[in-house]
Image: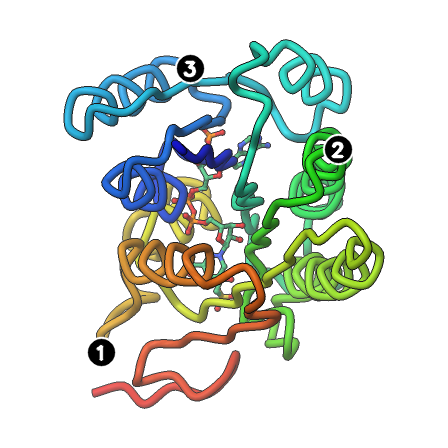
Amino acid sequence: MTKTVLITGATAGFGKAMAEKFAAAKYNCIITGRRGELLQQVAKELKDSFGIEALPLVFDVQDKEAVYAAIESLPHEWKTIDVLINNAGLALGRDSFENADLNDWETMIDTNIKGLLYVSKAVAPLMISRKQGHIINLGSTAAKDAYLAGNIYCATKAAVDMISKSMRIDFLPHKIKVTAIHPGSAETDFSTVRFKGDEQKAAAVYEGYTPLYAEDIADIAFYCASLPAHVCINDLVVTPTAQANATTFYKG
Ligand code: NDP
Ligand code: 8X3
């Protein structure tokens, strides 16, 4: 039977690569993001390239009502979501605690924590009623260790780590798998967003070593989702070979 994956933040980066990976394996894809035109374009590419069904849903994960309205509006045949990938997220700024912008902090908290909770709360009943499902949350090496001027981004990802652990316990009776994937440095739009469009600063993050690419994370997410029903990867940390943990790199 055809399976369905819902991927948040599929207009770029990991989310787009994951949509392509799952579509290539003939999953039907519900893809979300705020940039409607881009999302429509991704949906068209998925349908044209892989011959699957793709449903674009435009909403901001920070907007609780919009999240619920979008999930409730799903046509019946799209409600059998086998895999939910909570990927939408961002870092804003790289400033020390005393200099950081409160608005940046609030956006990261509202997106990375509250957005993930809204989507999960809206989708979980659909999985619970079927007694099956898999939720994959995107954490980060920043969840495992704080780094200089990473403060609230690290805190939001540590929250994703703990939310994943608690989901795994609470969803046990419902046979829902929960996997947290924690990537290290990956070259996507992430740093351009973090540095608010400063491409030079963004490019400098990836200089002197080979970072991860979006396709690496897509392969890993697909592998986690493809294991037999009795096997669940709980927590997976993946870094470039040149990165040992959140703070230690070998460059040059
Ligand atoms: P990108 O910036 O390339 O992509 C982020 C995606 O999230 C976009 O599709 C964007 O879509 C979506 N998004 C952001 N904010 C919102 C929002 N408020 N509502 C809906 N969608 C939103 O980044 P990555 O692919 O690198 O990041 C994906 C996830 O992986 C994030 O959670 C990030 O924290 C995490 N991560 C990234 C790492 C990296 O080094 N790149 C490493 C570890 C974790 P749109 O703008 O259209 O809304
Ligand atoms: C993104 C990777 O190292 O910028 O989560 O925190 S890092």
> From mark 2 to mark 1, how far is it between C-alphas?
49 Å
* Pick the front one: 245 or 105: 245
> From mark 2 to mark 3, how far is it between C-alphas?
30 Å
> From mark 1 to mark 3, how far is it between C-alphas?
35 Å
Q: Pointer 1: what residue?
A: 208
Local crowd size for mark 1, using a 10 Å CA cut-off: few (<14), some (14–19), many (≥20):
few
Kind of element beneath mark 2: helix
Q: Where is residue 73 in the image (x, y as percent from the top left)?
A: 63, 9
Q: Pointer 2: what residue?
A: 129
Instruction: Please name the amino acid that badge 3 sits on.
Output: Gly
Disc 2 vs disc 3: Cβ atoms closer than 8 Å?
no
Q: Position of residue 185 (x, y in %)?
A: 40, 68
Q: Which mark is residue 36?
A: 3
Q: Which mark is residue 190?
A: none
The reply, left or right, for residue 32 in relation to residue 96 is left
Q: Which of marks 2 and 3 is in front?
A: 2
